[in-house]
Image (spheres, rainbow, N blue to C red):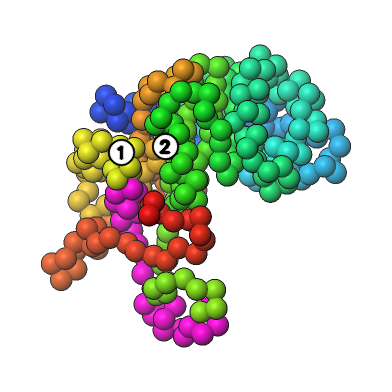
Amino acid sequence: MIFSDTYTFHKRYSLLTQTELDEYSEMPWLYTPLVDTQYNPSTISTVTKQNLNKVLDWQYTMKSRDTIKNEYKRLGIIHTNENAIKSYVSRFDLSYDILRREKSHYIKGTNTKHLNDVWEKIENAVSVNERGPTGTRLRGMTHDQYGTANGITVVAKTYDLSSYNSSLLLELNDYSTRNKMHVGSQLTICPDKVIYDMDLKYPRIISGMKQYEKTAFKEMTGEDMMMNKIKPSFYQGVKRHLFGFDRYNLLTSEQSNYIIDNIYQSIGRPSADFKINLQYVFSSDGTLVDIICSRICYDKFEHCEEDRTFVKDEVDLRETTIVYAEYTETGLSYKT
C-alpha cells in the first residue's frame, strides 16, 4: 500500500507480452502529501509535489467562470510491487470549452508550454464535437517520475483520429461511440504516444424490463421492475465486454483467453469476482505498442474481488450472459 489507505488499486498486465507490468494506486488529492504531510507516501520530493500541484491546484483568474471541485481531484501513482514510483497521473474534471477562455493562463500556470504540439493535437481530436459546458472535458494529465506533465487526457463524445493512420484506433473509437452505455473512452495524447482508455462500465442492477419504452415506465408494476431485477457480477460484465471485443477483432482469442485463464486465475481464489479495464497504447505514427489490462482490485474503497456464490444448483452463474435493454438509439451494443 503506497498511500495511507487503499482507495483505488490496480495490477497491470501487458496483453502483447502476456506479463505483469506494475501496479497503479490512486487517492483523492486532499488526502495525499501534496496537501497534507501526514499522509503517505512521504518519499515524494518537494520539487515533485510542486510540479504536480501546478496542475492539481490550478485556479481560474476569474473564479466565476466555473467551479473547480477539489473533491474530484485525485493523484495516481504507477509503481512497482515494492512501491518504487515510476510515474504519476493527475485526475480532475474541467470543461475544456470554458478552459479555452483562459488557455494561455492555464498553459503558463501548469507549466505545460513544452506540450504545445500535444495541445494542438488535442484541439484537432476534439474539434468534431459541439462546443459548450456539456462538451469536451479535460480529465487529467500524465507525469514523469519528477511530476513534470508529459501527456494530456480528455473525454469527448467522439474523436477525430484520422491523422494517426491506424485502423485499430479508428475501430476503437467507432466501437466506443456506439457503446456509450458500456464504454467511457478517454484519450491521452503524449509527444510520443497515444493512449485510448476504454474506461469499461459495469452494470450493478438490471431491471426486469425486457424492452425499453419510455411510456412503459408509468405502466410497469413493481414486480416487473424490481422483483425480476438481477445484480450481475463484475465477472459477467468482463465476459460481456470480451464478447464485444472479440466480435470486432479488438482483441484476439489468445488475448481474451489470457485475461480469463491467467489474469483472473492470478487472484488465487476460485470464487473471487473479477473486474478489468483496457488501455490501448499507440506510437505517434499509429503503431500498436501495447494493450494494458488493469485488474481492478479496489475501486473507490470497494473491494472488487470479493468471494461470490457463483455456483447455484450446479450452474455456474459466471457463464450466464447478462442481457439488458438499451434506452438510447445510439447505445446499440453491436452493429446491425
Tag 2 or tag 1, which sits nearer the N-term?
A: 2
For the image, the number of numbered tags is: 2
Q: State yes or no: residue 21 in magenta.
A: no
Is residue 125 visible from the viewing direction of this image? yes
Asked if residue 310 is positioned above or below residue 184 in the image, the reply reads below
**Kind of residue at badge 1:** Asn
Task: Tell me the crowding category of disc 1: few under 14, some 14 to 19, or many 20 or more residues within 10 angstroms, Cα based.
Answer: few
* Residue 28 image point, x, y percent: 58, 41
Determine whether label 1 and label 2 are within 8 Å by CB.
yes
Q: Secondary structure at mark 1?
A: loop
Q: Is residue 159 left or right of residue 277?
A: right
The residue drawn where x is 51% and y is 79% is 216
Where does the magenta region start and end? 217-244
| Residue at (24% x, 58% y) in the render | 318
Q: Quadrant of the N terminus?
A: top left
Q: Residue furthest left?
A: 314
Q: At label 2, which amino acid type do we have? A: Glu
**Could you say where residue 187 lies in the image, as x and y percent from the top left?**
53, 33
Q: Looking at the picture, how far across and down is residue 235, in whole percent?
A: 30, 53
Rounded to the nearest angstrom, the CA distance separating label 1 from label 2 is 9 Å
In the picture of the structure, the residue carrying the numbered disc 2 is 171
Name the residue beneath numbered marker 1. 249
- Quarter-of-image position of residue 89: top right
- Identify the residue at image location x=29%, y=26%: 16
Q: Is residue 268 above or below residue 223?
A: above
Picture residue at 50% right of the left edge, 73% below the top: 213
Q: Please tell me whether residue 228 belongs to the stretch shown in magenta.
A: yes
Q: Is residue 49 visible?
A: no
Per the image, label 2 sits on a secondary structure element best described as helix
Relative depth, front residue between 116 and 266: 116
